[in-house]
Image (cartoon, grey):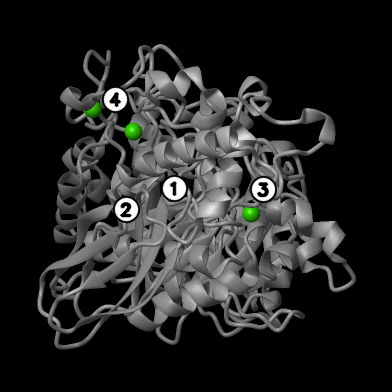
Amino acid sequence: MFQLYPNPTVSRWQRNHPTLYSVRCPTSKTNRSQLALLAIQVLPPYHRSLGGNTSQGNAYRGLAVTHTRRLLVIVIAVALSLNCAAAAPRVAKVEPPNWWTGLVSPVMVLLYGENLNDARISASYPGVQIEKTQLQPDGRHAFVWLDISQTAKPGDVPIAIKTASGNTSASLQLLARAPEQGRFQGITRDDVIYLIMPDRFADGDPSNNVPKGAAPGTYDRSAPKAYHGGDLKGVQDHLPYLKDLGVTTLWLNPIFDNDNTSEGYHGYSGSDLYAVEDHFGTLLEFQQLVSAAHKQGIKVLLDMVPNHVGPKHPWAASQPAPGWLHGTTANHINTDYDYPPVTDPHAVEKNYRSALDGWFADKLPDLAQENPLVAQYLLQNAYWWMETGGVDGFRIDTFPYVPRTFWKTYLQSLETTYPNFFAVGEVYNFEPPVVSYFAGGQKGFDGIDTHLTTPFDFPMNSAIREIVNHGASAKKIVDVLRQDRLYPHPELLVTFIGNHDMPRFLTDAKGSTAKLKLGLSLLATLRGIPQLYSGDEIAMPGGEDPDNRHDFPGGFPGDPHNAFTAAGRTPEEQDVYAHVQGLLNLRREHPALRLGGQKHVVVADDYYVFTRETADERLLVVFYKGESPKSLSVDLTGTSISNAHGFTALNSASPITLLGGKLQMQLVPMSVAIYKVN
Ligand SMILES: [Ca+2]
Ligand SMILES: [Ca+2]
Ligand SMILES: [Ca+2]
């Protein structure tokens, strides 16, 4: 009832009476005797002894108070009442900041402020009704569910807040939804995804490099973990480069606001989930970027992080409701990153509790998605970004660290509103039985379908790196593909050879661009939706984080060379760029590379021959990682191309001869040859 709280605006009187200072104003339901008791309890010993008999032990309970003490109690009670009477309600922030007519309803509005406990909240707006309210005892948070009918018109919905101590108001802006044309497109097998870390791609607007309130050193291009100035305008400026490369989709690392005093450049420590990071630009610039990308035929995936927020998010100090987070900043468990028990039918809660409820790096506040208030907040936040940007889907961070029941509700809702909705989830594990358990379209042993469109193909990422860079047998690819049966939609797996969380492929290949090109060739020809990591197409090196997050050359003022243009690229950069561009051209021109089923022809330690086939087109792909030429003869009997009568090389591949159902060819060292099967 009486809570302790630190009030930054205390009077000198309060500072001199620290016990009183720490007492929250009683609620209006508090009766006078409670107030009196409080006053007695907070009396300093000197005052307590006035006229009282302290030898009776607890002399302050009951009616055995003297006349003098009664007077003192009344004086202090009145002082407290006056102090409280002055504390009128105040609203500092409303989330969401706006909503849309004709979108999901009711919308849960979270008011942040002071003295909101015991408020009477009303809204008077045609077509809008308050379904319910939930006031938090801390007085700093209130939830209001607004039922918005189909007939409600766009405008500002006034929300009136009345308490015994005063009145205040807030409002929720209702917007009309933008036409769906060209928005919410989803991602398909025709797409090629390109991962951009916005801070490290291009600085299109130096004026936002040191935003208001940024701590000294937060922007420093020489510091690997500081902001480097990249922004949304920089991405927009280079859309032609991406189009020229053959990219059709951008995945942007999180663009919501991170605090301006710590290492938020990567975006994964949210401090305001309803704002664009001020180093990256404005909400308007975000909308302009998506719209410009869509005009050029490029889709946008936003990176969502429903698992946690950053340590500077206001929730870390003051939770909107009890159980909003798993624990508190002072008292929580650390995650052990051991989530595979979630996929184990024999596991007990003890085996996965730390993965689900633990705080990342022991410092990122872990959200309690099993709390319906948190679940609704996160779902509405997802809708808000979808509607605000018209984006085409999400990349979802740390997918297994969030309860599967939450995903089911969250993703199913989005899928219902946006029929083409696409979400790719990060399940950082190299075993298909673990990764596939989180794919939607099937129920796990827990009876839950997560509705995740697809996870990333981490097992294939590992196989490609092991085979190309570390001497593993090419049979490892077949080992991964054999387990495609575990996924409802293996054709939608997002494949990749690198991302921002692992050493760059080139560095893993000890600097061999031949190996990098080999890895990229596999990426472009194997089943799945390929994802590139910005910079890999120009042979950028880089070790562990943050060495794998260097600035894209040419994106920043004073860069010595500009890899965004053919003339500016070094010969090595141009070599790899042209290789990727050629591969993506082939994908565009040959539906079988995008849509075709994949069949094995033959596999050995240093080569893997396979087909990609649609009803109209059959392609033969020959991967060879040997470092010297080799003659290969393959009997096509019993393969899906046993009726082939000839092969046409599509890239600079050596000719194939076909004699008596046997294919004969010269394997070019470290190459992927692609043929049309006639
Ligand atoms: Ca900038
Ligand atoms: Ca910020
Ligand atoms: Ca969690």
Q: Are marks 1 and 3 in contact (CB under 8 Å)?
A: no
Label 4 belongs to which residue?
229
Does label 4 or label 3 sit earlier along the sequence? Answer: 4
Dot 2 falls on a residue whose secondary structure is: loop
Dot 3 falls on a residue whose secondary structure is: loop
Tell me if the residue at label 2 has its CB under 8 Å from ligand 1: no
Q: Amino acid at mark 4?
A: Gly
Residue 97 lies in what quarter of the image?
bottom left
Q: Residue at x 15, y 53 (%)?
A: 292
Label 1 belongs to which residue?
532
The image shows residue 635, relative to residue 388, as above or below, that is below
Does label 1 or label 3 sit earlier along the sequence? Answer: 3
Which part of the image, by quadrant, shows the C terminus?
A: bottom left
Q: Amino acid at mark 1?
A: Leu
Label 3 belongs to which residue?
327
Front tag of 4 and 3: 3
| Rendering coords of residue 529 (x, y %) | 47, 63
Dot 1 falls on a residue whose secondary structure is: strand
Q: Is residue 1 left or right of residue 140?
A: right
Does label 2 or label 1 sit earlier along the sequence? Answer: 2
Q: Residues within 10 Å of mark 4 (few under 14, many from 20)?
A: many
| Rendering coords of residue 8 (x, y %) | 40, 27
Which residue, as the protein is rendered here, is positioned at the far right? 346
Q: Is residue 553 left or right of residue 30?
A: left
Q: CA distance from mark 2 to mark 1?
A: 9 Å
Q: Which mark is residue 247?
A: 2
